Amino acid sequence: MSIQAHPLMLRCAALGAVALAASFVTAGAEAGPLRYRGTNAEGGVSSGAMVRRQGANGGNLVRGRALGTDGQGHGIVASGARVTGPNGGMGARAGSTRVNADGSASHQSGLNAANAKGSVQSSGSATRDAAGNLSQSRSTTATSNVTGNSVQTSSSYDSATGLTRSATCYNAAGAVIACR
């Protein structure tokens, strides 16, 4: 199994590490990080860590990270985290980055956050080919719980064509409104 061909495996491992850390640590307890490191069947190394922290006022943080190489110059790192606040707010993020021996690379990430005032979701990706050509895209949606209004933004970059961005705002009924 090549690390280059299976980036989802380590991303799932990092997210699984977050879930595992949350399930094994009792509520309210401080826990040191759990770490692992070793060689793998691909001739590289695999390592990772997971941790959970509980705040004095009831908030908590759980995060995990995994890294793997294949001994041929390919590597991937994946991470995930979730935080909850004492007043019900929450945020979560996951991402992975893969680098290949030829210099090409790719990245994917996303986040989700919400509290009593609103929510935001964002996801994006970026790639670099072996010749150094870049492309990137990201889309984000933010919604106000107070007004029901939302904004959807997108951006993309390509080293051949440059940067493009757009934003569209909506009222609570879904009709397009002017962005302020």
Image: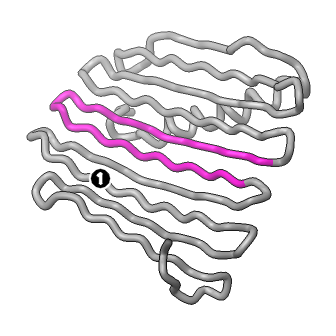
Question: Relative to 120, is 103 on the left or the right?
Answer: left
Q: Residues within 10 Å of mark 1 (few under 14, many from 20)?
A: some
Q: Main secondary structure of the magenta part?
A: strand
Q: Quadrant of residue 57?
A: top right
Relative depth, front residue between 77 and 111: 111
Query: Height in image: 140 above or below 43?
Result: below
Write the residue at 45% across / 76% down: 168
Query: Badge 1 is on which residue?
Result: 136
Q: Secondary structure at mark 1?
A: strand
Residue 105 in magenta stretch: yes
Relative depth, front residue between 165 and 103: 165
Q: How is the image coloured?
A: one colour
At which x and y percent is residue 87? 86, 45
Residue 45 in magenta stretch: no
Q: How many marks?
A: 1
Write the residue at 71% across / 74% down: 147
At which x and y percent is residue 150? 59, 72
- On-image quarter of the N terminus: top left
**Could you tell me the amino acid type at mark 1?**
Gln
Write the residue at 62% across / 13% down: 35
Question: Relative to 4, is 60 on the left or the right?
Answer: right
Relative depth, front residue between 37 and 146: 146
Write the residue at 62% across / 52% down: 112
At which x and y percent is residue 139? 44, 61
Q: Which residues are magenta?
A: 89-114
Question: Relative to 65, is 29 on the left or the right?
Answer: right
